[in-house]
Structure formats: structure tokens, C-alpha cells
């Protein structure tokens, strides 16, 4: 079978590797769709804290069980892959925070991932597989992971409705915007420095603003968006560079959803402003199992509109060109369909 392999910085190869053998108590899943995440591109080009090389990347995907030695799964079952392998026994897991598991291993980072034709899951890894009903809309289930990360982030702040500013019109930015609209936020603004990104594949009910980090405050004022936001979410590379305290409503929340590339300085936060405005600053990275289930249900039962997001489908062999595809077509999401 074919497999993608990261061997070094900006080095991605397609290799022929032996088919996996069914692990005792486990299953083999034939991948049907696997989405390329912004983090995959970022770690290919810049490395990543959790990446150990060489590595088969891929943590967003779904497939069909084709061999099983586990009574919970039968051949033909459609499954989505929760991106982490968690122990289920540590205090974090027992609290439902599987992404903070003491021994978490993430597919595609510190464990070989999903960009290959067949993926074996042993008896410890099988808890990452979530059954998907075939009765609903299963077309977008490879998007469950990024949506789950947005849901997980929202579980970290108390603001549930109001106005929001999303910084970054990449795939996760627009998915986040769509989640907020689905949850009843009355105003969702997406800012990005690229006009091209803002004019394609954004939720129709979101307002878009072209701006650099430095000019955002004046651009918001010029657009008449000066009443402040209840929620700000940086969803872009170097997300910690963007200022926010100037245009937050008192009591508002900021979700630090994306980090900076190595060597890029973070925005300095005026903690007096945080104090006087009673702001909530929250970090979010990854998603818990329950968030993943919620995301799958939202997608399968059409509780979120992701129809504006038109993926560019490729074969696994085309993956080494994915960075160029993302640049050239201005496509927000690339999904591997042929393995
Ligand atoms: Zn992802
Ligand atoms: Zn654990």
C-alpha cells in the first residue's frame, strides 16, 4: 500500500510499504477520506513540538473497517478517527479531558498517522475509532476534527452568544465562524490580511475585513465595528502576534487557538487592561473525545452549515504538492480521497 512519509523539514515522500497485519483484538481500517490540516503544513515546513521523525502524517480522517478481531466492530463499519490515543485512566481522562491525557499520543505527530491506504488499530488504539451512522450526511466527516477543536475551545470560555472576531480566514477560521453562527452569535467578523482568502469560501453571514495585524483596530473603526467584541479568536499562523485588548467588550474572552512559528514574538498583553476590563484569556489546543462526538453529530445531522467550504480532492500520490495546491487554488481544505 501507499503511504506518505515526512523524513525531514519540507521533505515529504510517497512510499510503498507492506500492508498491515490485523493486530490481536484490533481492526484494520481502509481510509476513505483524510483531510490535510494547517498544522500538517506548518509542521512539514517548520517542524512541530510533538513531531518525531520519520513520520506518516495525518490526524483528520475516516474510513471503513475491512478486518476485525474485536466484537465492537464488524467489517463494513464506517468509523471516524479521534486524533489521540489516550489512556482512559489518568485524572485528566477521568475528567473527560482526553486531549490532556498524561500519556497522549497524537496520530501523525508522535504516532504514525492516517495518510496511508490501510491503518491498523490495536486493542489500545481502538478507543480512537468512533462509529458513524450512515443514515446522516457523512460527506464531511473528515472535518470532524477541526470542528471538534473549535467546540473544545468554546467549552473553555463562558461567552455563549454575542459578537465575535475571528482572525484568519483559513479552514479552521471559517469553520469556527460557522460554529458561532450555528450557535446564535448575532455578529461574526472574520479578519485576514488576504483579500483573496476572504472573498472565497467564507460563511455568507459573516462580515469580512481585510487587515494587517497592526491596522486591525483602525480598520474595524473605519468599518463601523467599534462596539467591541464578546469573543476574539486568533485562528491563523502567528496568531499570538495580533492585538486584541483595544477592541474587546468588558468581560469579553480571547481564545488563543493558534500559536506562533518559532522565533515570532507574541503580542504583549496589557494586564492592567485585562484586570480593569475583566477579560478572560484562554488557551486551547486539540479536542476531547466528547467534543469529537459532538462535532461528528453536528456534521452528520446537518446542525452546522459547512456547504461554503468546498474541499479540493486529491490522491495520496499528489500529497507532496499539497502546499502548492493550497497556495495556487486558494483552497482552504485539501482532502485525500484516493489512497
Ligand atoms: Zn487538524
Ligand atoms: Zn489518560
Image (cartoon, grey):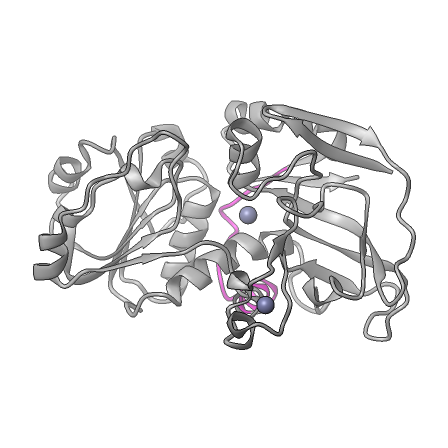
Nearer-the-camera pick, 125 or 81: 125
Q: Is residue 34 left or right of residue 162?
A: right
Q: Would you identify the image quadrant in which residue 295 lies? A: bottom right
- What percent of the width, then of the height, locates residue 154? 38, 63
Compared to residue 113, the image places residue 325 above or below, namely above
Is residue 313 highlighted in magenta? no
- What percent of the width, then of the height, locates residue 65? 83, 60
Is residue 305 highlighted in magenta? yes
Q: Please give the name of the residue rendered at 49% of the width and 47% of the height, measured from the top-left corner.
A: 308
Q: Please give the name of the residue rendered at 12% of the width and 45% of the height, measured from the top-left corner.
A: 224
Nearer-the-camera pick, 92 or 226: 92
Q: Dividing the image into 4 quarters, which one contains the C terminus?
A: top right
Nearer-the-camera pick, 303 or 28: 28
Compared to residue 270, the image places residue 263 above or below, namely above
Q: Is residue 272 left or right of residue 203?
A: left
Magenta range is: 294-312
Q: Is residue 237 left or right of residue 322?
A: left
Q: Would you identify the image quadrant in which residue 279 lies? A: bottom left
- What percent of the width, then of the height, locates residue 194? 35, 29
Q: Would you identify the image quadrant in which residue 117 lies? A: top right
Amino acid at each position: 500500500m501507499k503511504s506518505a512519509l515526512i523524513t525531514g523539514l519540507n521533505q515529504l515522500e510517497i512510499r510503498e510499504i507492506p500492508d498491515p497485519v490485523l493486530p490481536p483484538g484490533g481492526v484494520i481500517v481502509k481510509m476513505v477520506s483524510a483531510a490535510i490540516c494547517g498544522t500538517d503544513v506548518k509542521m512539514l515546513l517548520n517542524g512541530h513540538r510533538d513531531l518525531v521523525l520519520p513520520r506518516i502524517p495525518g490526524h483528520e480522517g475516516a474510513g471503513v473497517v475491512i478486518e476485525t478481531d474485536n466484537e465492537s466492530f464488524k467489517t463494513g463499519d464506517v468509523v471516524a478517527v479521534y486524533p489521540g490515543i489516550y489512556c482512559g485512566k489518568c485524572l485528566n481522562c477521568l475528567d473527560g479531558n482526553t486531549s490532556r491525557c498524561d500519556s497522549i499520543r497524537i496520530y501523525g505527530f508522535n504516532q504514525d498517522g492516517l495518510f496511508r491506504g490501510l491503518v491498523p488499530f490495536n486493542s489500545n488504539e481502538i478507543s480512537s475509532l468512533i462509529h458513524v451512522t450512515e443514515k446522516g450526511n457523512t460527506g464531511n466527516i473528515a472535518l470532524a476534527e477541526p470542528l471538534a477543536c473549535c467546540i473544545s475551545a468554546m467549552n473553555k470560555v463562558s461567552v455563549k452568544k454575542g459578537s465575535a472576531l475571528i482572525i484568519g480566514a483559513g479552514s479552521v477560521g471559517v469553520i469556527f465562524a460557522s460554529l458561532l453562527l450555528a450557535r446564535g452569535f448575532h455578529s461574526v467578523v472574520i479578519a485576514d490580511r488576504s483579500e483573496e482568502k476572504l472573498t472565497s469560501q467564507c460563511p455568507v453571514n459573516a462580515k469580512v475585513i481585510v487587515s494587517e495585524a497592526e491596522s486591525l483596530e483602525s480598520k474595524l473603526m473605519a468599518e463601523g465595528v467599534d462596539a467591541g467584541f464578546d469573543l476574539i479568536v486568533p485562528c491563523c499562523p502567528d496568531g499570538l502576534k495580533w492585538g486584541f485588548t483595544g477592541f474587546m467588550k468588558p468581560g469579553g474572552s480571547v481564545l488563543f487557538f493558534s500559536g506562533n512559528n518559532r522565533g515570532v514574538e507574541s503580542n504583549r498583553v496589557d494586564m492592567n487592561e485585562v484586570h480593569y476590563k475583566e477579560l478572560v484569556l484562554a488557551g486551547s489546543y486539540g479536542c476531547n473525545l466528547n467534543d469529537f462526538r459532538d462535532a461528528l453529530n453536528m456534521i452528520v445531522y446537518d446542525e452546522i452549515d459547512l456547504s461554503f467550504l468546498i474541499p479540493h480532492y486529491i490522491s495520496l500520490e499528489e500529497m507532496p504538492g499539497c502546499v502548492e495546491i493550497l497556495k495556487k487554488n486558494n483552497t482552504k481544505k485539501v482532502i485525500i480521497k484516493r489512497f
